């Protein structure tokens, strides 16, 4: 695993709000990730998230037009909770250290993972933000996005608006059908050139949860598969948004309570607990 960051990479991320890392996984590691994710998806039998009766492709209440959004991508969350192989991958402290170094925090917790699969001819993923959907508010939160297939402009690779995370807010404007919808909220970025995050399979990107990002349509007859994980800096508190938290946790959770439950959001790296990796 190509997990050691350079000063230049950290600086680029902190200036732009994203970073692409080529050849993040070796050939054998990529095959392990593909197998683990495929098996975890099969085990789910169409259930989008553990403990909630939502099938892949169902309207989850976030968006109004279920028919359109069901054809953007297949989305399965928290595979780490139902598959041991995925749990091992998502809990890798080397990745946790990368996330901590990029975001400038001491500790990193898993918020949720996601398998994101654009089927042949899938709709585009409109420009959006991540953190406003989550149950905590931290400008340093971030995600990793690992390409399990080549991600290209033709099949729906990611795009980023450089520097946007410095000015966006936690106000949740949702994800609309129109690609330019976000610019009605943040018109200052409508003229900023986007960055095309095309990647070979086994490469990855990190992006800040307040970076404006999206993905194109899949204009091919093949799949574009990715495995992602969102990270919460250690020490965050509940902001009242349920998001992916299960009812059993929410019933005893009040706004302002610290989110430190290792069952639901495990701590995978802390600077004072992890010192060095091969």
Image (cartoon, rainbow, N blue to C red):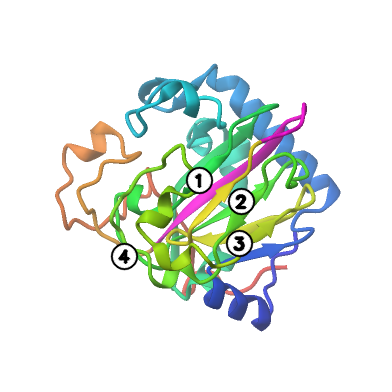
Distance (Cα) linking label 2 and label 3: 18 Å
Q: Residue at x 67, y 47 (%)?
A: 157
**Residue 139 to residue 261: above or below:** below
Whether residue 134 appears in this view of the structure is no
Q: Which of the marked residues, 1 or 4, is nearer the chain's N terminus?
A: 1
Given this view, does label 4 or label 3 mark the residue nearer the observer? 3
Mark 1: secondary structure: loop
Mark 3: secondary structure: loop
**Foreground pick, 43 / 214:** 214
Badge 2 is on which residue?
A: 145
Distance (Cα) linking label 3 and label 1: 13 Å
Q: Residue at x 73, y 36 (%)?
A: 34
Mark 4: secondary structure: loop
Badge 1 is on which residue?
A: 179
Distance (Cα) linking label 4 and label 2: 23 Å
Badge 4 is on which residue?
A: 235
Q: Quadrant of the C terminus?
A: bottom right
Distance (Cα) linking label 1 and label 4: 34 Å
Q: Which of the marked residues, 3 or 1, is nearer the chain's N terminus?
A: 1
Instruction: Report the number of numbered marks.
Output: 4
Mark 2: secondary structure: strand
Q: Which of the marked residues, 1 or 2, is nearer the chain's N terminus?
A: 2
Picture coordinates of residue 36, whole percent (x, y): 67, 34
Badge 3 is on which residue?
A: 194
Distance (Cα) linking label 4 and label 3: 33 Å
Whether residue 52 appears in this view of the structure is yes
Q: Quadrant of the N terminus?
A: bottom right
Which residue sits furthest top? 45
Picture coordinates of residue 218, whole percent (x, y): 68, 35
Per the rendered image, the range of residues in magenta is 218-233
């Amino acid at each position: 695993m190509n997990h050691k960051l350079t000063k230049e990479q950290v600086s680029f991320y902190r200036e732009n709000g994203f970073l692409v890392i080529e050849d993040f996984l070796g050939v054998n590691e990529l095959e392990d990730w593909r197998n683990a994710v495929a098996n975890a998806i099969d085990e789910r039998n169409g259930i989008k998230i553990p403990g909630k009766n939502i099938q892949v492709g169902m309207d989850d209440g976030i968006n109004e037009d279920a028919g359109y959004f069901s054809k953007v991508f297949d989305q399965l969350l928290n595979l780490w909770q139902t598959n041991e192989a995925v749990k091992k991958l998502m809990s890798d402290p080397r990745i946790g250290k990368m996330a901590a170094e990029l975001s400038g925090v001491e500790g990193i917790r898993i918020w949720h993972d996601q398998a994101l699969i654009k089927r042949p001819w899938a709709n585009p993923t409109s420009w959006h933000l991540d953190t406003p959907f989550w149950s905590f508010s931290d400008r340093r939160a971030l995600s990793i996005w690992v390409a399990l297939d080549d991600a290209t402009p033709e099949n729906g690779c990611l795009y980023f608006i450089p520097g946007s995370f410095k000015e966006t807010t936690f106000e949740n404007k949702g994800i609309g059908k129109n690609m330019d919808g976000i610019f009605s909220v943040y018109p200052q970025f409508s003229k900023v050139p986007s960055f095309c995050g095309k990647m070979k399979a086994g490469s990855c990107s990190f992006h800040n949860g307040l970076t404006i990002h999206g993905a194109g349509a899949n204009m091919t007859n093949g799949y574009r598969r990715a495995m992602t994980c969102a990270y919460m800096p250690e020490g965050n508190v509940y902001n009242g948004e349920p998001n992916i938290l299960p009812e059993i946790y929410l019933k005893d959770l009040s706004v302002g309570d610290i989110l430190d439950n290792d069952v639901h959001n495990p701590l995978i790296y802390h600077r004072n607990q992890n010192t060095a990796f091969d």
